[in-house]
Amino acid sequence: MNTKIAKKILLVDDDEDLRSLLKMFLNIGGYEVFEAIHGEDAKEQLKIITPDLITLDMMMPVLDGMGFLRWLRQEAKLDIPVISLTGRSRHDTQPIALELGATEVIFKPCYPEELVEAINKILS
């Protein structure tokens, strides 16, 4: 019997509609999805779960993506792959996100299929 354990994805984004849409696509893709509405919420989630990958919005209230990514890599020292999602221009956000430890940067608006494809590639 082949029982494949679903990989866990943590979606960190303050946009509820986007989280719902991405969650639907990821569930269809066979992933177990957890959600956080900002960086502090994501820190709380990480006390309970260890995701295989995090999708991280860069612009959120309370603790933004840059702050969370800095915390994840420098304080928590966690090596979880992170896909940074940003609506900001490529020139200022991408290099900073990558320098802080993002695995990949995807620009909003993006197709959910594009994100699922990137996740599949990173986790395969």
Image (tube, rainbow, N blue to C red):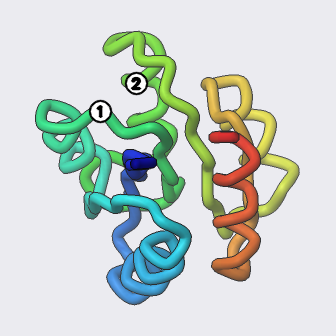
Between circles 1 and 2, the one closer to the viewer is 1
The vertical placement of 60 against 39, above or below, is below
Residue at 28%, 62% (x, y): give it: 35
Q: Which mark is residue 50?
A: 1
Residue kind at label 1, given as amino acid type: Thr
As helix, strand or loop, the secondary structure at mark 1 comes to loop
The vertical placement of 100 against 10, above or below, is above
Q: Is residue 104 visible?
A: yes
Q: Which mark is residue 72?
A: 2
- Neighbour class for label 2 at 10 Å: few (<14), some, many (≥20)? many
Describe residue 101's horizontal placement relative to residue 23 as left or right.
Answer: right
Describe residue 54's horizontal placement relative to residue 94 as left or right.
Answer: left
Q: Nearer the viewer, residue 67 or 73?
A: 73
Q: Where does the image place residue 7, in percent across and percent down from the top left? A: 43, 47
Q: Nearer the viewer, residue 118 or 85?
A: 118
Describe residue 27's horizontal placement relative to residue 104 as left or right.
Answer: left
Residue at 55%, 70% (x, y): give it: 29
Q: Spatial distance from mark 1 to mark 2, Cα to Cα?
A: 12 Å
